Image (tube, rainbow, N blue to C red):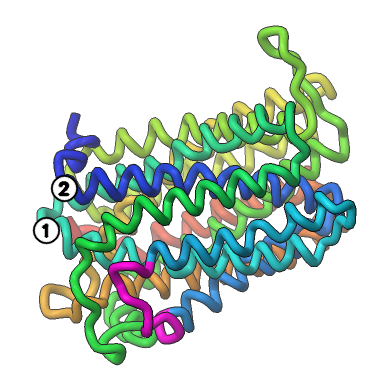
Amino acid sequence: MRAFAPLAEPIVARLWGAMAVFTTGDELFRVALIWLAVETVGRDVGYLGALQSGAVLAGAMFGGALTAFLDPKRALTTYCIFGAACTIVPFLVWQFGTPAFLALAFTAVGVGSLRAQIEPTVQGNLPLLVKNRDVLFASNALLEGTRRIARVTGPMIAAALALVLAVHQIFLIHMLTLLLAGWLLLAVGAKFPEREPREAGGFVLGLKILRDDPVLKRLLAVKTVTDGAWVVVISHAFPVVVESTGASWSVFGFHVSGVAAYGLGIAVYGVSNSASTFAVGALPATLSPRRMLMGSTVMSAGLAAMAAAPLLAPPDLVLPYFYVALGLCALGSPFFDIPLSLHVQISGGPGAPRAAAASVHRVRLVTAFGGIMIAGLMSPTLFALFGPGYSVLGSGIVALIACAAGFRMLAPYQRSIK
């Protein structure tokens, strides 16, 4: 199958295995972090998301310079060890009976900073290891699929662990996955080329390249708005509704509620998202803005449809309504995200510095997490003023407007892009 063809490349296969471990652990972390935050601060959970997004934003902007001294062949492993040290903090704090939001905030910042270094490192080196454009496109889909499969396996594992462990003990499992991923990434890093001089890359280079790429600028603008809407709905409103209403559902003889209901919802999203990702990976490589925006429109429509759960559904059907809309929402985003990765990787053209892809990816992280941070800061106020239901509806409508604006802004460039 075309979507899995990159696994014939040993380096891609090794990277895929390492990232499967890393992203599964990351989803365990996400479920545990959000749920403990909801239990600790309730509707103000958005502030924690904003803090973590700010850490990713700062890490993307300044991380290239601050980590320039690291051996590039061991950098990925070093980042994982740093993340493991951060993630053990809330485990220890809760284990000794002193729950504190500050511990969650510290860990959110540490793991956010970790992500801001790992993603540019992988995205910057992948086009240097995989030369064929179609194989690179499929490799992006494969790695994206790995992350999206983790949205299935991670929450399912978290839901199962929550039956036998306290939620804070899931952080210990996440620490172990980071250490395992770091060990596996040693073999991947050994294949990376030597780092270019420090001045050849970084956030500033990404800005210079983006300045001369009108299509990528407009795509990132749309992505910033839709990512912010996604976070308000799925990361914040969904768990708040589940926790505040006590929503539950009995399926196949099992009764799900609380963190298990939230984890199952994220798993439903992951199943649909993964299937769509591998379908996109099997298609020929394309950068068509029209197809990308159609996918983003489907995602945005799914976000708006989620408002039916808190606003229209009877109490015993709140979760099924959410799950159906989550599945619809998840189908669209891969049609935007995977071509966007390819666009970033080939930005600057053939004569661009070797660090161009990593530099532009840092800009991509800054724009995405800038929008996410703003959404996180806004969501507590939105929930207080309008309630989660109408906040979900409004977020979906804003995302749809951004897609419509994207169609208009990118129409002049459609024919010149293949």
Circle 1 Cα neighbour tier, 10 Å, few/some/many (<14 / 14–19 / ≥20): few
In this picture, is 132 found above or below 9? below
Extent of the magenta region: 64-75
| Pointer 1 residue | 131
In this picture, is 140 found above or below 218? above
Give the residue at the far top of this rendering: 253
Magenta stretch: includes residue 66: yes
Q: Amino acid at mark 1?
A: Lys
Circle 2 Cα neighbour tier, 10 Å, few/some/many (<14 / 14–19 / ≥20): many
Residue 84 or residue 127, whichever sits in front: 84
Is residue 351 visible in this depiction of the protein? yes
> What numbered label is drawn on residue 207?
none
Residue 131 in picture, x, y percent from top left = 11, 58
Q: Residue at x 71, y 30 (%)?
A: 260
Q: Is residue 347 left or right of residue 82?
A: left
Secondary structure mainly formed by the magenta segment:
loop
Q: Residue at x 70, y 35 (%)?
A: 262
